[in-house]
Amino acid sequence: MASAWKIARKSNAQLPLLIVIALAVVLVLLGKAQSGLFDKARAHITDLMAPVLERVRVPAAHFDRWIGSLTEIFSVYEQNLKLKEENARLRQWRNVAIVLEGRVGRYQALLHAVPDPKMNAVLARVIGRANRPFLQTMILDAGRENHALPGQAVVDARGMIGRIYLTGQRTSWVILLTDLNSRIPVTISTSSGSVGNIQAIMAGDNSRMPTLEMVSHTVVLHGGDQVTSSGDGGLLPAGLPIGTVVSDGSGGWRVVLLADAGTSQDVEILNFSKPPEALPANAQLPAEAAGLRPVAPPPPRPSTSPPIPQSALPSAKPKALAKPQAPAAESPADATSPASSDDDAER
Amino acid sequence: MASLERAGTPPRFRFLVALLPLFCGLFCVFLSNIPVSLLGGLVPPPLLGLVPVYFWCLVRPDLMTPAAALVIGVAQDVMSGGPPGVWTLAFVLTYGLVARQRDSFAGLGGLAAVVGFAAAAAFACAVAYVTVAGLALLTLGAHLPTLSPILSQLAMTVLFYVPAVLVVGSLHHKLIGASRGDL
């Protein structure tokens, strides 16, 4: 045994440092090109650790709260006054919101507006947090078993926290909005109201306040402007509250997030999937709604004569232009329907 | 190994004892990467995995090989959740630096020993930061990660070095210490 171990050490364990460094460099490049193997390992380890994390979560949260209370004990009185004032203001806003919600609902009904897509949500508990130099994440106790999938938005009662980027069987990793790799298309509702909504990209940089990028130089933002998800790209639902705009003091803009990922305990995973756009029914097409029936294309005739140049037939031009419009105005179902061709024949 | 034989370590345990630095490094990585925040996420966790790498690279480089440093780095990458390979490269390069300057580092004592470890940890953090910044520039445009989190992690690592090295040193003296004579 001892001699075998000596031989093994001589042959394998003493890898030259250069080879190991080269291996590490290859690992960096490989991880950048395809991080699936690492992600699977992480998800598997987190799944294994989930029961332990759930047990540790409660005492850790208590300790965390206790540490927090030590720092806040000196400002309890001021905070209480501030909260009371804020609560009174929020009650007023709540009443306004209820009235406006009813009004928007009536307008939508009048305009036959397309309703917002319905979202299923999975309630999950935060069982772990990691605040690392190159990653800001939290771990949830819902995974593929609970239909949590990468890309889904994670929100708490206050607003959006981040997106799921890795799912195990029973756990999920959430990339926070503050993480370096987070990029979210957002809409900024200006308080002046003169420019309307502004589209931008909110990018995390591992600081507490993500930056706003891709904002046009002609646009003037104001502190306090509301930031919500824009829904561009169809990955996230539109209108999720995210935060408010603040100036960073150097001409740029940052977002103060509404949600506090450091204290959230229960969150929702929004299962948002935009359904494919359905073709409108015939009766809803503008021409049919106006009482006009689309002209069916004439049946194809076998061409026996040589083609005539278009320049020689000036009167044929409008026909040639009008011809493709007929199929475009009707749905594909009508083109193959024998009933529609009969109707056209009668006309 | 000859020293382990001389010390009277039972043969069946020699293999395990020789792997102790590696296991210790892996345990430290696991310990520092448990995703539980006790301070509200104010500070990042220390790089505890670097302590066994540094310690045994100076004391018993035959037990803490470059391959062991590589394995500990990979574990740190998997557990920490960051970009793959970053800490692996940082640990291996730090191991190389410490191994090359072994005489200088091993001769330090007291506060100077802490400063020596701080220099090695700073080198590891610098390698990790430069690697992540390079990857970020490749994929995200000119968007560098902020420096303060990595500096906080360096400070935490140095802060935790003294208690960690006491535990590691105690393990070394109790389980591997008999073989120190042939260094």
Image (cartoon, coloured by chain):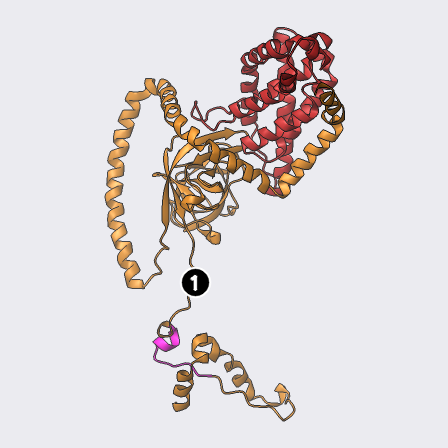
Chain colours: A orange, B red
**Which of the 4 quarters of the picture holds residue B128?**
top right
Residue at 46% in and 46% down: A149
**Vertical relation: B159 (above or below) B78:** above
- If the image is split into quadrants, where does the C terminus of chain B sit? top right
When the figure is inspected, residue A138 is found, relative to residue B57, above or below; the finding is below
**Secondary-structure class at tag 1:** loop
Horizontal relation, residue B50 to residue A150: left or right: right
Q: Is residue A301 magenta?
A: no
Q: Nearer the viewer, residue A318 or A203?
A: A203
The answer to which image quadrant residue B39 occupies is top left
Quadrant where the image shows the N terminus of chain B:
top right
Q: Could you classify mark 1 by the number of other residues whose Cα lies within 10 Å: few (under 14), some (14-19), or many (20 or more)?
A: few
Q: Chain of mark 1?
A: A
The answer to whether residue B112 is visible is yes
- Asked where in the image residue B174 lies, by quadrant, the reply is top right
Q: Which residue is mark 1?
A: A277
Residue at image location 53% in from the left, 81% down from the top: A321
Magenta-colored span: A285-296
- Name the one closer to the observer, B33 or A300: B33
Most common SS among magenta residues: loop
